[in-house]
Image (cartoon, helix red, strand yellow):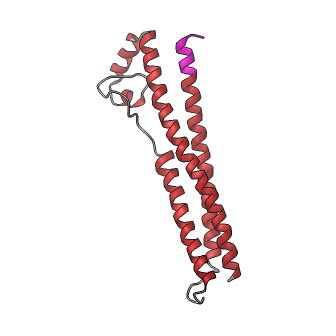
C-alpha cells in the first residue's frame, strides 16, 4: 500500500468514527427525550400549592431543578458541541486544498479542475495529511463532548429515579 492510499484509508476511517460519534449523540438525544416525557408525566403528580414545605418536598423540588439543569447541559453539549457543523481552523485561508470542502465550495469549478490536473503525489500527500489533522481534531473534540454528555445522561437517569421516588412518596 502506498502512502497516498494509506492516508486516504486513514481519512475514511476517521470520517466513519465521526459518523459513529454523531450516531451515539443521536441516541443520547432520544433517551433525553424519553426522560423529559417521563419527567413531565411524573411532575403532573407534584403540586407545590397543595404541599406543606417539608424537607421531602424541598428535596423533591431541588431534584426537579437539578434534572432540568442537567438535561439542558446535555442538550447544549449534543447540539452545539457535537452535532453543530465545524469548519477547519488550521487551514491557511490563502491556500487552496482539494480535500477541504470549504476551499472547493468558495472557489470556482475551473480552479478546482485546474488544481486537480496540476496535483502530484507529494501535494496530495500534504493535503491528505492536512485533512487528517483537521478531522482528527474535530473527532477528538466530539468524543470529549460525547463522553461528557453520556456521563450527564447517567446522572439525569439517577436524578429522574430519585425524583419519581420522592414525588410518589409525597
Q: Main secondary structure of the magenta part?
A: helix
Look at the image and say whether residue 5 sits in the magenta stretch. yes
Which residue corresponds to the image point at 43% horizontal and 40% vertical from the top-left?
86
In the image, taking residue 50 as reference, residue 101 lies left or right, namely left
Which residue corresponds to the image point at 56% horizontal and 46% vertical from the top-left?
146
Which segment is the magenta one?
1-9
Which residue corresponds to the image point at 66% horizontal and 63% vertical from the top-left?
158
Which residue corresponds to the image point at 40% horizontal and 12% vertical from the top-left?
119
Q: Is residue 7 above or below residue 69?
A: above
For the residue pair 103 and 111, the one nearer the viewer reads as 103
Look at the image and say whether residue 134 sits in the magenta stretch. no
Q: Quadrant of the C terminus?
A: bottom right
Query: Which residue of the protein is positioned furthest toward the left in this rendering?
Result: 94
For the residue pair 82 and 150, the one nearer the viewer reads as 150
Q: Is residue 159 above or below residue 26?
A: below
Q: Is residue 3 above or below residue 158?
A: above
Spot occupied by residue 35 in the image (x, y as percentages of width and height): 63, 63
In the image, taking residue 96 as reference, residue 165 lies left or right, namely right
For the residue pair 100 and 69, the one nearer the viewer reads as 69
In the image, taking residue 118 as reference, residue 157 lies left or right, namely right
Spot occupied by residue 10 in the image (x, y as percentages of width and height): 56, 23
Spot occupied by residue 46 in the image (x, y as percentages of width and height): 62, 81
Spot occupied by residue 42 in the image (x, y as percentages of width and height): 65, 74
Residue 95 lies in what quarter of the image?
A: top left
Query: Which residue of the protein is positioned furthest toward the front in this rendering?
Result: 55
Q: For the image shown, how many numbered marks are present on the structure?
A: 0
Q: Quadrant of the N terminus?
A: top right
Q: Is residue 85 above or below residue 11?
A: below
Amino acid at each position: 500500500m502506498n502512502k497516498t492510499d494509506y492516508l486516504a484509508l486513514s481519512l475514511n476511517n476517521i470520517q466513519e468514527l465521526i459518523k459513529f460519534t454523531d450516531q451515539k449523540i443521536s441516541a443520547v438525544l432520544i433517551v433525553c427525550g424519553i426522560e423529559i416525557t417521563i419527567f413531565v408525566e411524573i411532575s403532573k403528580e407534584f403540586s407545590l400549592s397543595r404541599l406543606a414545605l417539608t424537607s421531602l418536598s424541598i428535596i423533591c423540588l431541588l431534584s426537579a431543578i437539578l434534572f432540568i439543569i442537567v438535561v439542558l447541559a446535555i442538550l447544549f453539549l449534543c447540539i452545539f458541541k457535537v452535532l453543530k457543523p465545524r469548519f477547519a481552523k488550521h487551514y491557511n485561508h490563502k491556500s487552496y486544498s482539494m480535500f477541504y470542502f470549504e476551499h472547493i465550495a468558495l472557489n470556482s469549478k475551473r480552479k478546482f479542475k485546474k488544481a486537480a490536473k496540476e496535483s502530484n503525489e507529494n501535494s496530495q500527500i500534504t493535503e491528505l495529511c492536512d485533512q487528517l489533522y483537521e478531522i482528527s481534531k474535530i473527532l477528538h473534540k466530539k468524543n470529549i463532548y460525547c463522553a461528557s454528555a453520556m456521563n450527564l445522561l447517567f446522572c439525569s437517569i439517577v436524578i429522574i429515579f430519585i425524583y419519581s421516588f420522592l414525588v410518589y412518596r409525597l
